Amino acid sequence: MQLQIECNGSFNQETCLLCQELFQMRKARLIVCNDRGESYGELCPQCVAKGYNWLGTKLQQLTPILSH
């Protein structure tokens, strides 16, 4: 699993992959991808703000679900 940061040209509403809350996209977006670069979804600023260790734990919990 990888994290990919992209510049964002539009300010759409998205659903966070982890907390399932709607959030407004900002100037950059953080995308969770598989090893081939295929997107699983995006992360909201509130989840990102919880830090690397918290994100790592949550993403590991999602790995079996996303693999199927």
Image (cartoon, rainbow, N blue to C red):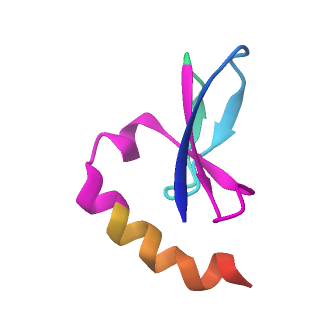
Q: Identify the residue shown where x is 40% and y is 68%.
A: 58
Magenta-tinted stretch: 28-55
Q: Identify the residue shown where x is 65% and y is 20%.
A: 8
Q: Residue furthest front?
A: 36
Is residue 68 positioned above or below 17 on the image?
Answer: below
Q: Where does residue 32 sit, x and y in percent of width and height?
A: 58, 54
Query: Which part of the image, by quadrant, shows the C terminus?
Result: bottom right
Is residue 27 positioned above or below 31 on the image?
Answer: above
Q: Identify the residue shown where x is 42% and y is 35%.
A: 45
The image quarter containing residue 4 is: top right
Count of number-bearing discs: 0
Q: Where does residue 59 sit, x and y in percent of width and height?
A: 46, 68
Query: Which part of the image, by quadrant, shows the N terminus?
Result: bottom right
Q: Where does residue 57 sit, x and y in percent of width and height?
A: 33, 71
Q: Identify the residue shown where x is 57% and y is 48%.
A: 16
Is residue 6 positioned above or below 58 on the image?
Answer: above
The image quarter containing residue 28 is: top right
Of 47 and 59, the residue lying toward us: 59
Q: Where does residue 11 sit, x and y in percent of width and height?
A: 68, 17
Is residue 41 positioned above or below 57 on the image?
Answer: above
In magenta segment, residue 54: yes
The image quarter containing residue 15 is: top right
Q: Is residue 56 left or right of residue 7?
A: left
